[in-house]
Amino acid sequence: MVFILVFAGSLLANFLIPFWWSTVPIAMVGGFCFGKSGRSSFLQGFLGNGLVWGALIFIRSVRNDHILATRIARLLHLGHWGGLILVCMIIGGLLAGLGSLTGYLFRQSLNRRQSIINLKT
């Protein structure tokens, strides 16, 4: 469920909000509401946003026959434009994965705090 929310939300946010960090709050909400464990929250957020960023970058790169992506890849010593897309996918995946993990851990901390308060009363 986190994957679907992050995938759809980040796809929509990348078209509507022009900021690179716009997917992090969406991933946090997904991890908070639907996260089952820390590992699954991170992986689902990572895959959801990583696939979206990879697809969007690939679509935008195809429009100009990968000229800009090839030049930036050479500048960063990646060799091929596909390496640049892979690096961008990893960065986007880490953003959403850590955001989703943060949301899950925040929910866990609230649950733990509530149980401590219940024990004291």
Image (spheres, rainbow, N blue to C red):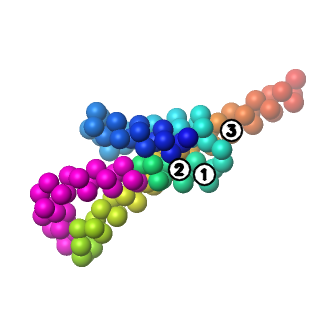
Residue 69, image x, y percentages = 19, 63
User: Is disc 3 placed on a helix, strand or loop?
Assistant: helix
- The secondary structure making up most of the magenta span is helix
Name which residue type carries label 1. Answer: Ser
In-front residue for pair 22/3: 3
- 6 shown above or below 42: above
> Which residue is found at the position 50% from the left and 45% from the top?
3
Residue 119, image x, y percentages = 87, 30
Q: Nearer the viewer, mark 2 or mark 3?
A: 2
Tell me how far mark 2 sits from mark 3, CA to CA. 20 Å
Q: Which residue is mark 2?
A: 44
Q: Say whether marks 1 and 2 touch (CB < 8 Å).
A: yes
Query: Furthest residue to the top?
Result: 121
User: Is disc 1 placed on a helix, strand or loop?
Assistant: helix
Tell me how far mark 1 sits from mark 2, CA to CA. 6 Å
> Which residue is found at the position 19% from the left and 73% from the top?
74
Q: Which residue is mark 1?
A: 40
- 62 shown above or below 45: below
Q: Which residue is mark 3?
A: 109
Magenta-colored stretch includes residue 109: no
